[in-house]
C-alpha cells in the first residue's frame, strides 16, 4: 500500500492533547503512577529486521527509510489520534530512532490507553511520499508491567497476517541511574556506528522541581518532545524539549492598559483643572482634551475586548495585524531544553521566543519608533513661537513630579493625622515615631519641587492666563524668613492665588514652597517642647511604671499641668496641610501646563506615537515578565543568582533576526525602542497571600514596578533586601543579524546602518553591565565565572565581530547568547513571527549547546538538528500558528540563509501565513 502524503495533507492535524482525548465519559480508568510534574510516560523506539520495501520497477532493491508514527486511542474514545512521529532513519532494516515519545503530566493517559505504532517507508523525503510497512499496538499497562519495561512487538501488515519486522518500545526514566545497562544494538546509519549504552546520572536536586506547580499557573499547553543522542564517548544523552504558552501574554497587556487608562484619565483631569486660560490656550486645551478623551475611549474598548479573552495564552502569527490584539505579544513561548547527560549534572536551557515587539496594526510605511520619535522631536523643536519647547527629559520630569505629588500628598496627610492621633493619646514614643515619618515624607515632598522646571512652568502658565504678562524684574529676594507661617504674612488663598497680569511675583512661589518646610519645623519645635515639658513634669511629679501618678509631692516650680498635646499641635498640622495644598495646587497646574504644551504642539502625532510606544512596550513587557518569572523560579535555589539579582540585576539579551529591508526596518525600529524602554521596569518580589499568583503592575509610563508573587516557602529563601521589597533591575540588550533573502538585498543594495548602530550601542550597554557585574559580585563568584568562561575574551570577540561589519555575521548572535548564558541572564529570540527563522535559530542554539557543553557526538550534530526541526516542538509551533506543518520558506529564501539555518528537506514550503 502506498500513501501519498504531500506536505499539505497534514494540515490541520495536530499532536497536542485534544479535548477528545480527555473525554473518558463515565468510565473509571487506571491512572498510572507518576512523579508530580514529571512526564507520565516516555519511551524510545527501535525496529529490527524490517522487510525491504517492494522494489520499484527497474530499480535495485533497497533498504527501508523508516519512520514510526505514534497514535493514541483513549479507552471509550472513538479512534486513535495521531500523537507523535519519529524522524526518518535512512537505509537500514534496523533503525534506531533518536526521537522518542513523551506524555507530559497534563496529558490524559491510563493503563488502558492504547498506543498504535505504524511504520512507514519514506521514498521521497522532500515530498514526504511514504508507503505503509507494518503496525503494532500495545496498552500503556502492558508496557509498564513488561519485564524491564521493554516490549518487543511484531510488526504486521494491515490485514494482520504477515510479520514484517519487530519494533522495540522501551520506557525511559529521566533521572534514574541505569548504571551499566547496555543495549548492544548498533546503528549503521550512514556510517554512524554507535554502541548504545543507557547510563544516566542522578537528577540535579536543585532544579527547583517543587516550584513547578507555581510555574504551571503561568505556563500553559506544553508540547513535549524527547530525544536521545549519542555523546562523543558513545553513551546516550537524553533531551527533553518543551514549549509552553503563557497566560502572561494576555495578563500583562490587560494590566498595562488599565494603568494607561488611569494615568491618562488623571492627566485629562489635571488639564481640565488648569483653571482659566486665555482664549488661544483655552481652544488648544479643548482640542487636546477631545483627542485625549478619544484615546482613553480607545484604550477602554481594547481592554473590554481583551477581557473577553479569558484564559487565552497565545496570539498566533496570523493575528498580528488585529487591532484588538495589538498589545498582545505574537507567538510568545518558553522554549526549554532539559539535558540529561552521563556524568554531568542535569541542565536546563531556556529561551523565550516571541515575535519582534512591533506595531503591526499601525504598519511600517513611515518607519518604526526609533525613526518616528526622532523625527517628531525635531519637528516639535521647530514649532515656532507659539509653544515653549520642553525637551523629552523635561516632559518626563513634569510627569514624574506630578506623580510624586499625587503619591506624597495623601501620604503626608495620613502621617499628619497619625501624629495628631499620637498627640491625643499623649504618647511620647508614638509621637516621636509619627513625627519621624511625617518629616521624612515632607522632606521628600519639598525636595520634589526643587526644580527649575516648576519655576519656569509657573511663569509660562502665568503668561497663558487671561491678560497674563510677566512683570520684570522680580523683586529682590528678601532675607530668609524662618519664622513659623502663623507669624508670616497670611498665606495666599487657593483660587485667588493664581497670579494675574501685573501682580506676578516670581518669588511668591519660593515663599509658598518654603512655607511647607517652615510649617514642618514649627511642628518639630512644638513636639520637642511638648516632650521636654512632659518629661520635666513627669520627672518633677514622678510617675510609676504603669503611668499612674506617685503620691510623692510635686515640685511647684518645674511642674506643668498635663498639657493637651492635640490642641497644641492641631493648628500647626492644619497649617502644614494648607501650605501643602497651596504648593500642590500651583505645581500641579504648572506641570499640567507643560504637558498641555507638549500635546498641543504635536497633535495628533504625539498621541499616535504614544499609542505605538505603548503597544510595542506592552508586547515587550509581557515577554520580559514571563522570562523573569521563569528565571526566578528555576534559579531560586542558587544563592549566587539571588545575590546577583539584587546587587547588579539581570541582563536580558534579545537576539533579533529581522532584516534591515522593507517593512522589517520599521519592525526593528519599533523593537529597539520597545526593548530599550524595558529599562524603565523594576521588579519587586512579594509574598503571595492567596492563590492568585499573577503579577501586578504599578507605576506610570516612565517607571513601572512589576510585583511578582511567591508563596511563603519560596519567599523565605530570598535574601533579606529582596524580601524587604528592594527593586530589582533588568538590563536589556538587543543584537540583530538579518539572515534571509531580504537581508541579502539590504547588504548589497540597501542600508545596514540601523543594525550596525543597534549592535554597537547595545554592545556598550552589555560592556557596562559586565563592568558593574565584575565590580559588585564577590571575587569567588567572579573567578568561578572567569575561569570557566573567559567572559572578557567573549566580549572582545563580540566587539570585533560587530566592528568587522561582515554580512550575515551570525557569530554575533552566538557570542551574545553565550555571554548572556554565562552571565546568568534571560535569553530571547525574535523574528517577525517567532515561527520560522526563530525556530531555525533556537534549534541550532540547542544543538550547539549539546555539542559544546554536553559532548554531543560530532557526527550526530546535523541529525540532531534535523530531528528537532522535523519532529520537535518548533514544527508544532508552526502548526499552531498557521495550521500547516511547514516552515514558510522557499528554495530561494533558503539559499540566502546561512548554512545551519536551513531546515531539512520536506519540512518547508509554501504556507499561507
Ligand atoms: O517567523 P518568521 O521567520 O518571521 O516568518 C516569516 C518567514 O521567515 C518568511 O519566509 C515568510 O515569507 C513569512 O513572511 C513569515 O512571516 P509571517 O509573519 O508571515 O509568518
Image (cartoon, rainbow, N blue to C red):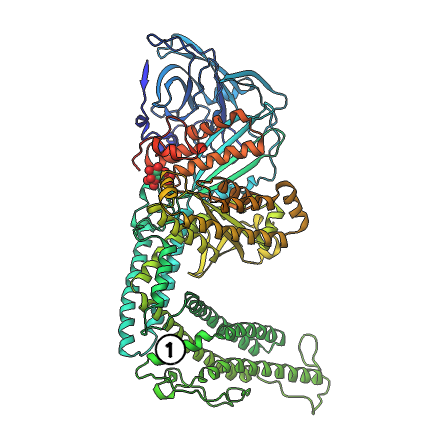
577 is higher (above) or lower (below) than 478: above
User: Residue drawn 46% across and 34% down?
Assistant: 843
User: Residue drawn 32% across and 65% down?
Assistant: 602
Is 379 left, or right, of 95 in this rendering?
A: left
- To which residue does mark 1 refer? 460
Task: Point out the quarter of the image occupied by ligand 1.
Answer: top left
What is the x, y in percent for residue 110?
45, 27
What is the x, y in percent for residue 762?
49, 51
- Whether the residue carrying mark 1 lies under 8 Å from ligand 1 is answered with no
In the depicted view, which residue is nearer to us: 288 or 263? 288
Q: Residue furthest right?
A: 552
Is 193 left, or right, of 615 in this rendering?
A: right
Q: Residues within 10 Å of mark 1 (few under 14, many from 20)?
A: many
679 is higher (above) or lower (below) than 142: below
Visible residue check, residue 373: yes
User: Residue drawn 58% across and 48% down?
Assistant: 713
48 is higher (above) or lower (below) than 264: above
Mark 1, secondary structure of its residue: helix
Amino acid at each position: 500500500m502506498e500513501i501519498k502524503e504531500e506536505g499539505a495533507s497534514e494540515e490541520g492535524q495536530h499532536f497536542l492533547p485534544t479535548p477528545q482525548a480527555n473525554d473518558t465519559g463515565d468510565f473509571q480508568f487506571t491512572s498510572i503512577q507518576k512523579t508530580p510534574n514529571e512526564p507520565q510516560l516516555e519511551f524510545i523506539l527501535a525496529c529490527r529486521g524490517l522487510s525491504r520495501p517492494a522494489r520499484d520497477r527497474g530499480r535495485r532493491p533497497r533498504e527501508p527509510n523508516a519512520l514510526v508514527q505514534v497514535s493514541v486511542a483513549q479507552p471509550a474514545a472513538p479512534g486513535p489520534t495521531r500523537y507523535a512521529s519519529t524522524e526518518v532513519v535512512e537505509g537500514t532494516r534496523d533503525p534506531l530512532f533518536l526521537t522518542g515519545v513523551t506524555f507530559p503530566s497534563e496529558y490524559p493517559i491510563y493503563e488502558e490507553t492504547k498506543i498504535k505504532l505504524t511504520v512507514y517507508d519514506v521514498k521521497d523525503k522532500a515530498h514526504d511520499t511514504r508507503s505503509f510497512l507494518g503496525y503494532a499496538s500495545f496498552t500503556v499497562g502492558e508496557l509498564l508491567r513488561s519485564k524491564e519495561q521493554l516490549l518487543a512487538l511484531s510488526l504486521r501488515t494491515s490485514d494482520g497476517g504477515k510479520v514484517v519486522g519487530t519494533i522495540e518500545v522501551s520506557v525511559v526514566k529521566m533521572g534514574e541511574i541505569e548504571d551499566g545497562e547496555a543495549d548492544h544494538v548498533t546503528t549503521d546509519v550512514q556510517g554512524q556506528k554507535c554502541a548504545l549504552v543507557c547510563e544516566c546520572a542522578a537528577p540535579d536536586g536543585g532544579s527547583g522541581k517543587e516550584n513547578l506547580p507555581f510555574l504551571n499557573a503561568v505556563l500553559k499547553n506544553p508540547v513535549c518532545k524527547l530525544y536521545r543522542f549519542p555523546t562523543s564517548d558513545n553513551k546516550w544523552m537524553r533531551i527533553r524539549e518543551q514549549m509552553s504558552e503563557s497566560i502572561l501574554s494576555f495578563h500583562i497587556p490587560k494590566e498595562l492598559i488599565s494603568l494607561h487608562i488611569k494615568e491618562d484619565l488623571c492627566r485629562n483631569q489635571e488639564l481640565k483643572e488648569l483653571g482659566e486660560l486665555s482664549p488661544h490656550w483655552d481652544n488648544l486645551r479643548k482640542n487636546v482634551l477631545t483627542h485625549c478623551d478619544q484615546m482613553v475611549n480607545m484604550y477602554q474598548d481594547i481592554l473590554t475586548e481583551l477581557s473577553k479573552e479569558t484564559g487565552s495564552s497565545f496570539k498566533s502569527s496570523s493575528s498580528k495585524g488585529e487591532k484588538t490584539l495589538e498589545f498582545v505579544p505574537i507567538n510568545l513561548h518558553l522554549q526549554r531544553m532539559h539535558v540529561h547527560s552521563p556524568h554531568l549534572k542535569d541542565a536546563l536551557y531556556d529561551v523565550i521566543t516571541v515575535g519582534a515587539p512591533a506595531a503591526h496594526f499601525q504598519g511600517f510605511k513611515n518607519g518604526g519608533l526609533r525613526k518616528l520619535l526622532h523625527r517628531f522631536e525635531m519637528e516639535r523643536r521647530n514649532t515656532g513661537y507659539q509653544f515653549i519647547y520642553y525637551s523629552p527629559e523635561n516632559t518626563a520630569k513634569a510627569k514624574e513630579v506630578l506623580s510624586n505629588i499625587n503619591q506624597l500628598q495623601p501620604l503626608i496627610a495620613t502621617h499628619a493625622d497619625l501624629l495628631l492621633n499620637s498627640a491625643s493619646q499623649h504618647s511620647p514614643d508614638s509621637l516621636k515615631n509619627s513625627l519621624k515619618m511625617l518629616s521624612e515624607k515632607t522632606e521628600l515632598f519639598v525636595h520634589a519641587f526643587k526644580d527649575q522646571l516648576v519655576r519656569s512652568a509657573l511663569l509660562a502658565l502665568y503668561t497663558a492666563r487671561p491678560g497674563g504678562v510677566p512683570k520684570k524684574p522680580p523683586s529682590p529676594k528678601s532675607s530668609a524668613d524662618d519664622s513659623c507661617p502663623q507669624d508670616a504674612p497670611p498665606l495666599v488663598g487657593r483660587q485667588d492665588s493664581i497670579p494675574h497680569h501685573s501682580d506676578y511675583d516670581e518669588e511668591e512661589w519660593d515663599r509658598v514652597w518654603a512655607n511647607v518646610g517652615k510649617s514642618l519645623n514649627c511642628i518639630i519645635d512644638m513636639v520637642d517642647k511638648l516632650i521636654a515639658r512632659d518629661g520635666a513634669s513627669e520627672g518633677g511629679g514622678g510617675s510609676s511604671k504603669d503611668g499612674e501618678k506617685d503620691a510623692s509631692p510635686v515640685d511647684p516650680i518645674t511642674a506643668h499641668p498635663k498639657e493637651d498635646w492635640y490642641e497644641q499641635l492641631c493648628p500647626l498640622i492644619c497649617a502644614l496641610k494648607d501650605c501643602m495644598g497651596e504648593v500642590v495646587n500651583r505645581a500641579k497646574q504648572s506641570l499640567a501646563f507643560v504637558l498641555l504644551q507638549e500635546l498641543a504642539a504635536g497633535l495628533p502625532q504625539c498621541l499616535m506615537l504614544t499609542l505605538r510606544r505603548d503597544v510595542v512596550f506592552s508586547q515587550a513587557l509581557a515577554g520580559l515578565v514571563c522570562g523573569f518569572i521563569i528565571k526566578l523560579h528555576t534559579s531560586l535555589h542558587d544563592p549566587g543568582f539571588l545575590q546577583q539579582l539584587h546587587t547588579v540585576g539581570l541582563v536580558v539579551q534579545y537576539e533579533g533576526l529581522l532584516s534591515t529591508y522593507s517593512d522589517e526596518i520599521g519592525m526593528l525600529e519599533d523593537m529597539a525602542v520597545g526593548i530599550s524602554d524595558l529599562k524603565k521596569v523594576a521588579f519587586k518580589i512579594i509574598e503571595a497571600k492567596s492563590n492568585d499568583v499573577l503579577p501586578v503592575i504599578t507605576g506610570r509610563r516612565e517607571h513601572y514596578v512589576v510585583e511578582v508573587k511567591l508563596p511563603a516557602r519560596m519567599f523565605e529563601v530570598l535574601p533579606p533586601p529582596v524580601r524587604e521589597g528592594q527593586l530589582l533591575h533588568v538590563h536589556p540588550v538587543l543584537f540583530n543579524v538579518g539572515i534571509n533573502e531580504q537581508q541579502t538585498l539590504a547588504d548589497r543594495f540597501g542600508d545596514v546602518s540601523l543594525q550596525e548602530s543597534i549592535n554597537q550601542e547595545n554592545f556598550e550597554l552589555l560592556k557596562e553591565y559586565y563592568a558593574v557585574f565584575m565590580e559588585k559580585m564577590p571575587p569567588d563568584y567572579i573567578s568561578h565565572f572567569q575561569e570557566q568562561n573567559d567572559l572578557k575574551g567573549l566580549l572582545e570577540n563580540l566587539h570585533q565581530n560587530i566592528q568587522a561589519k561582515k554580512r550575515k555575521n551570525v557569530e554575533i548572535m552566538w557570542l551574545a547568547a553565550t555571554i548572556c548564558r554565562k552571565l546568568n541572564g534571560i535569553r530571547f529570540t525574535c523574528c517577525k513571527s517567532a515561527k520560522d527563522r526563530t525556530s531555525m535559530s533556537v534549534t541550532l542554539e540547542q544543538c550547539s549547546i549539546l555539542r559544546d557543553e554536553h559532548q554531543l557526538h560530532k557526527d550526530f550534530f546535523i541529525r540532531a538538528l534535523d530531528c528537532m526541526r522535523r519532529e520537535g516542538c518548533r514544527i508544532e509551533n508552526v502548526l499552531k500558528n498557521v495550521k500547516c506543518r511547514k516552515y514558510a520558506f522557499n528554495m530561494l529564501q533558503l539559499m540566502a540563509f546561512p548554512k545551519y539555518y536551513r531546515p531539512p528537506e520536506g519540512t518547508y514550503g509554501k504556507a499561507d501565513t
